[in-house]
Amino acid sequence: MTVPSIPEGQEVNREVQIYRDIDNVYCEPGLISILILSRGNHFVFKKCFETTLSSLKGYRGDLEYIFLEQGWDTDPEGAYNNVQFFNEVTEHIDRSLVVLPKHNGGINYGINQLWQLARGEYVLFLESDWICGHPGEKWLEYGKMILDHNEDIGILQVRSIGDPNENWGVGKPEFSPWSCPGRDGVEDRPIVFEEKGLYFYVAKEKMYGVNNNPALWRKKMRDELGPMQEPEPWSDLRHGETTYQEAFMQTNWRAAHIRLPVYFHCPIRMRK
């Protein structure tokens, strides 16, 4: 995972040692780490990873894929199939890694393990029950451009605003698909000032913008916030975002949302 590919045509000479110009080896400029957390259910994981890979097959930037599977206790067959599938489809991807903890420590535990290994300047975090619905790589190219040109943005959410999720989706009483205030509470900001017609949303007011939904995180912001709290092994292992969101509220980072339909929550019928 940590060794970049050799440029085509460049001779390999092990007698010469050249060091890369990186101040922080855990924050490589331009690299995007894609972190995937799964707990069995091969059908759902396969859909998530297949659609993500298909969407990014034309992306020309540097990517690394890190996958953590913690479904051995509840769905050993699904967990095994997930690992096999990940290794199969990433066989020719230079930067990919599988993490297999011996016990299920919960969502926050898995997230912390993934972040500890990520070396990207930006990080896309995915739980395996999200499906990429964008046909090409432009969403990630635009996402990187947004973070490159807007140093106040710490997190760029890529959950689809039009997601018809069964709990909070379009038309539901608690419709809030991207954790920002309503349309009056956001500002339009151009992706890059030189181009017209390409905009994204930025929350005008400070709000709880960090969560475990699909989003591009700035590594610098994550380092500032630190790891998430992990539950005791004997207690409820489900995630708790409250303290993390409160920490975010004490910073100067802002939350934004891309104006493209990228990730959609997997329907309940597929998660059963």
Image: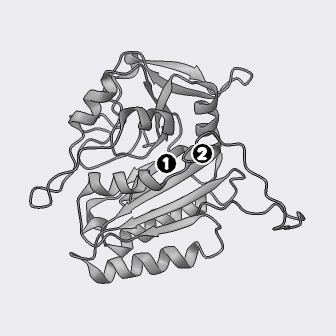
Residue 250, image x, y percentages:
32, 21
Q: Is residue 216 left or right of residue 128?
A: right
Residue hosting label 2: 140
Residue occupying the point 29% across, 28% down: 247
When the figure is inspected, residue 14 is found, relative to residue 52, above or below; the finding is: below
- Using the image, determine if residue 80 lies above or below residue 152: below
Q: Which residue extends farthest left?
A: 234
Q: 266 or 57, which is in the foreground?
A: 57
Q: Quadrant of the C terminus?
A: bottom left
Mark number, residue 124: 1
The kind of residue tagged 1 is Leu
In contact (CB < 8 Å): disc 1 and disc 2: yes
Q: Residue at x 60, y 60 (%)?
A: 2
Quarter holding the N terminus is bottom right
In the rendered image of this protein, does residue 175 appear above or below residue 43? Answer: above
Identity, as a three-letter code, of the amino acid under mark 2: Leu
Residue 170: x and y in percent read: 33, 39
Q: State the separation of the CA atoms marked 1 and 2.
A: 9 Å
* Viewer-side residue, 215 vs 186: 215
Single out the mark in the foreground, 1 or 2. Answer: 1
Camera-side residue of 200 and 29: 29
Q: Earlier in the sequence, mark 1 or mark 2?
A: 1
Residue 43 seen in the current view: yes
Q: Is residue 191 left or right of residue 130?
A: right
